[in-house]
Every structure is written in C-alpha cells, then in structure tokens.
C-alpha cells in the first residue's frame, strides 16, 4: 500500500508488525484472517488496492502540474548488454503525469517500452533501446511508478 486513505498522500505509510499507519494518524491492524481491523475504510488488501488504483487514475490527491509523488535516496543506473552498470543519477525520483524524472534525466512515459518490479526495492525499465534500473536505498514502494506507467499503455 502506498496511498493513505486518511490524508490521500503517497509515501507516508509505514508498517510495524501487524500495523499499517500514516504520519496523519491513520492506522489499521492487519489480522491473521486477511482482514483489517477496523474494517473501515477497507475490509481487505484487495479493497485498498482497488481504491488506490482508482485514486491514481483520477489524480485527486495532487495539484495539477506538480509531481504526483516522489521518493528520496534512489539510484538510477543504465544496464549494459554485458550486464554492467553505469551510474546515471542519485537522489529523488519524481513521477509526473507524463514523465519519470531522476536527477537531470527525464523519461517520457509514452517512450518507456517496458517496466517491471524485480524486488521490493528494484524497478527495471527500457527506454529508447536502453535498459535502466532504479534502486531504493532506504526502502520505497516502487509499485506506484509501475501503476502510473501502465495507464499510458
């Protein structure tokens, strides 16, 4: 989960043991049965997932023209055919409605050919016949970037 139903901010959720909570005060407990307590605003993870995907599509959580969301402490590298890596940028990764930005690099979503999460902290994508990877240094949910890209396909 990456979008808080309490404050509608991306990237503010944290987990500890069976708790999911936000800096705004929102909190839920994930039960061994697969349900949340309390059962509002969502009863299950699937309910929350449907809601956050709809919210991403509607963009009702961010002012027009601003970054939809961002994460700090990421590394962007280019992957060579021999699987060697070249550092391209370090720092914030910003997602806009039409592009992905890291450092001085801009990747228009319409030109990204493929994107796939590999691990919880690693996202691969292809752009203009080249391959790139984004790695989170401090642990970020990179699935939200994949969801925005999927909308453009």
Image (tube, rainbow, N blue to C red):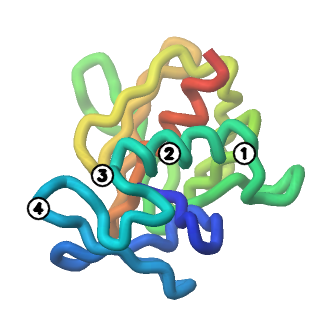
Kindly report the distance in space between the C-alpha atoms of the residues bearing marks 1 and 2. 12 Å
Q: Circle 4 sits in a helix, a strand or a loop, which is it? A: loop
15 up-or-down from 150: above or below = below
Residues 87 and 103: in front is 103
Residue farthest to the left, as pictured: 32
Residue pointed to by mark 2? 144
Q: Position of residue 98 (x, y in %)?
A: 75, 34
Mark found first going from the N terminus, 4 or 1: 4
Kindly report the distance in space between the C-alpha atoms of the residues bearing marks 4 and 2. 26 Å
Circle 3: is it few (<14), some (14-19), or many (20+) Cα within 10 Å?
some
Mark found first going from the N terminus, 2 or 3: 3
Mark found first going from the N terminus, 3 or 1: 1
**Front disc: 4 or 1:** 4
Horizontal side, residue 108 vs residue 131: left or right:
right
Mark identifier at residue 117:
none
Kindly report the distance in space between the C-alpha atoms of the residues bearing marks 2 and 3. 12 Å
Quadrant in the picture for residue 18:
bottom left
Circle 1: is it few (<14), some (14-19), or many (20+) Cα within 10 Å?
some
Circle 4: is it few (<14), some (14-19), or many (20+) Cα within 10 Å?
few
Residue pointed to by mark 3? 121
Residues 126 and 60: in front is 60
Q: Position of residue 15 (x, y in %)?
A: 29, 73
Residue pointed to by mark 4? 32
Residue pointed to by mark 1? 96
Kindly report the distance in space between the C-alpha atoms of the residues bearing marks 4 and 1. 37 Å
Mark found first going from the N terminus, 1 or 2: 1
Q: Circle 2 sits in a helix, a strand or a loop, which is it? A: helix
Placement of the C terminus among the 4 image quadrants: top right
Q: Residue at x 39, y 60 (%)?
A: 140
99 up-or-down from 125: above or below = below
Q: Are marks 3 and 1 in contact (CB under 8 Å)?
A: no
């Amino acid at each position: 989960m990456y979008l808080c139903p309490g404050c509608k901010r991306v990237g503010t959720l944290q987990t500890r043991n069976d708790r999911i909570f936000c800096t705004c005060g929102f909190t839920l407990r994930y039960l061994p049965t697969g349900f949340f307590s309390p059962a509002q605003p969502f009863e299950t993870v699937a309910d929350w997932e449907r809601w956050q995907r709809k919210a991403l599509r509607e963009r009702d959580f961010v002012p027009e023209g601003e970054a939809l969301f961002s994460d700090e402490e990421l590394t962007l590298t280019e992957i060579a055919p021999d699987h060697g890596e070249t550092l391209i940028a370090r720092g914030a990764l910003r997602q806009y409605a039409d592009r992905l930005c890291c450092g001085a690099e801009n990747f228009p979503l319409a030109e990204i050919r493929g994107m796939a999460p590999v691990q919880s902290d690693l996202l691969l994508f292809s752009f203009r016949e080249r391959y790139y990877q984004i790695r989170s240094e401090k642990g970020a949910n990179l699935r939200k970037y994949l969801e925005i890209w999927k909308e453009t396909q």
